[in-house]
Amino acid sequence: MFIKTVAITGANGGIGKAIAMMFAIAKEGYELVLTYERDIEGMEVTKNELISLGASSVKIYRLNLKDDSSIKHFVNSATKDVGFFDILINNAGLCVKKKFSEQNFIEIDNQIKVNFEGAVKLLHECLPFIKSTVINIGAKSLFEHSLNMAIFNATKSALREFTKSLLKEHEGLKFYTINPDLVATKSTQYEGREPIEVALVVKKIVFGEIVLENGSDINVWEYI
């Protein structure tokens, strides 16, 4: 059986972990390349869980999207280990939920670097090694201009437009932005829909159960 490789950023919890679990149980067989920023112990636990679920292979790497050298090191190490990625899922994100006027420069910079700048630089380094699909995780809040999320919404909006702008430059690849609404993760105090629901929408895209124009937004609440 031909094994495909999926790279997922921010995979040690929440949506990223749920997506990894979905690929682990898929009968098609997937090799998982997963990143974390700080919690190596938690990532090791996740790795073992995924192997027990049936993942063909699980490789984990530290990745700090605020650090150019970390981005380059991850891509160099991962591609040396697996050769290429069939699918890249830009999931890692950061939201400081408070008024823009109350945020300091560090909080502003970190959101811009993780949600947009780092994701863009990661894709820049990964592009020569991507064979099929890029999925960026957006957010419903960017359409609603949700309260106390101005920087987060701006970065997710920028990532969405960036995704659409890549289509003509890289006609052999597919690019999608998946927009969850409120999801029960640590950053939302576990309020909202379960992360596995977002993962199921990712599955529908990857497995061709949802067929949309390249560059499309996929709004999670429309497919659950």
Image: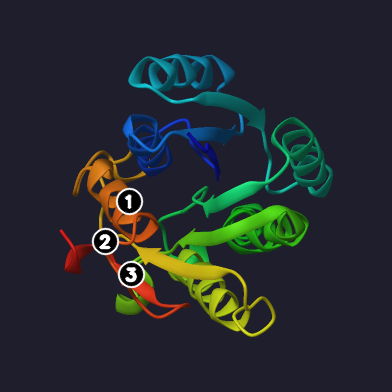
- Label 2 SS: loop
**Contact (CB < 8 A) between labels 2 and 1?**
yes
- Mark 2: give few (<14), some (14-19) or many (20+) Cα within 10 Å: few
Q: Is residue 135 above or below residue 67?
A: below
Q: Nearer the viewer, mark 1 or mark 3?
A: 1
Q: Please provide percent x and percent y for residue 95.
A: 46, 54
Can you tell which quarter of the image residue 150 is in? Answer: bottom left
Q: Which label is found at residue 209?
A: 2
* Element marked by disc 3: strand
In this rendering, does residue 146 appear at all? no
Residue sitting at x 54%, y 52%: 87
Q: Would you name the residue on which mark 1 appears? A: 203
First in sequence, mark 2 or 1: give its number.
1
Q: Upstream in the sequence, badge 2 or badge 3?
A: 2
In this view, the residue in front, 43 or 204, is 204
Comparing 80 with 13, the one in front is 80
